[in-house]
Amino acid sequence: MRIRYHHPIPNFYKIENPLNPLNTVSDDFLDELNDFVLNHGFVGISYSKLSDEFKKEWGIDWDNILILKYAMSEDILKMDDSKEKTILEDKEFQEVGKWTFEIADFLRKNNINADLIHPLDDAISLRAIAMQSNDCIILRSNMCMFKEAMNLGFFMIKTSIENLPYKKENDMLWVEDFCSTCGICIDRCPQNAYDENEKLIRKVCTAHREGCSKCMLICPFFKQGYEKVKKRYDRKQAR
Ligand code: SF4
Ligand code: SF4
């Protein structure tokens, strides 16, 4: 059973899914969707196409996923651990949840099937879906990082659109090597929340109970940003 980060989000759909949904859209529509998403407070979209193998493994029959990424407030993340911090984090999560329903309604209005994959659904791992985008990486600290920033959260929508701009290869795999020589997050976790195989012990980690964000705040990717760390890594490799 997954430890709950947040309260469930109520259903905010205002529009029904279309009876005869479109399976393909134009590049112009994708641009329009991107603008709509950015204007609703998200920082970007990634796209996952789930393979037959993946669908079989998770017992699902849908495969086209929009990953809507939002920046978690740095002001909140930098607060001292407290119940108040977790309440503010949940408030932010609920707000972004509402935006996600607006994106789904926009798609539905344009004759596209769109359904939120509920972030608290235990039946499927959103991180596993995210990794299928080839646009993120799971860090040694167990966080899922996209290039735009480390403090990104995400919501997902499954859609009928088949021709999304899926990435075929993941160019972030170098991060695994970088992490293997770093380990700051493991060494400095105040709760020793990683086991001997460096697997996060969720019931020991206080992120959800008290809002601990330390492993994010001390990570070079958070402090310097992805591109700077990559440049430094590349320079070192070239020596
Ligand atoms: S602190 Fe170091 S080891 Fe941990 S996730 Fe960040 S880069 Fe990787
Ligand atoms: S959030 Fe805090 S307690 Fe949890 S793993 Fe990171 S540093 Fe440790």
Image (cartoon, grey):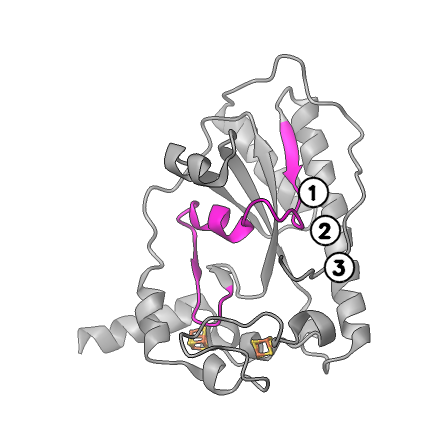
Residue under label 3, please give it: 92
Q: Quadrant of the N terminus?
A: bottom right
Residue plotted at (30% across, 73% down): 233
- Separation of disc 1 and disc 2 at Cα? 6 Å
Residue linked to disc 1: 100
Report the amino acid beneath label 3.
Glu
Q: Which residue is mark 2?
A: 96
User: Could you say whether the residue bearing mark 2 is in a helix, strand or loop?
Assistant: helix
Magenta residue check for 40: no
**Farthest residue in the top direction?**
20
Mark 3 closeness class: few <14, some 14–19, many ≥20 residues within 10 Å: some
- Is 122 situated above or below 137? above
Task: Name the kind of residue labelled 1 in the image.
Answer: Thr
Q: Is residue 52 left or right of residue 58?
A: left
Rendered location of residue 75, percent (x, y): 71, 73
Q: Disc 3, ligand 2: is the CB inside 8 Å?
A: no
Q: Residue at x 19, y 73 (%)?
A: 238
Q: Secondary structure at mark 1?
A: helix
- Dots 2, 3 in contact, CB < 8 A: yes
Quadrant for residue 114, please give it: top right
Going by the image, does 215 lie left or right of 54? right
Q: Secondary structure at mark 3?
A: helix
Residue toward you, 43 or 174: 174
Q: Residue at x 76, y 50 (%)?
A: 8
Q: Quadrant of the C terminus?
A: bottom left
Pick the front one: 171 or 19: 19
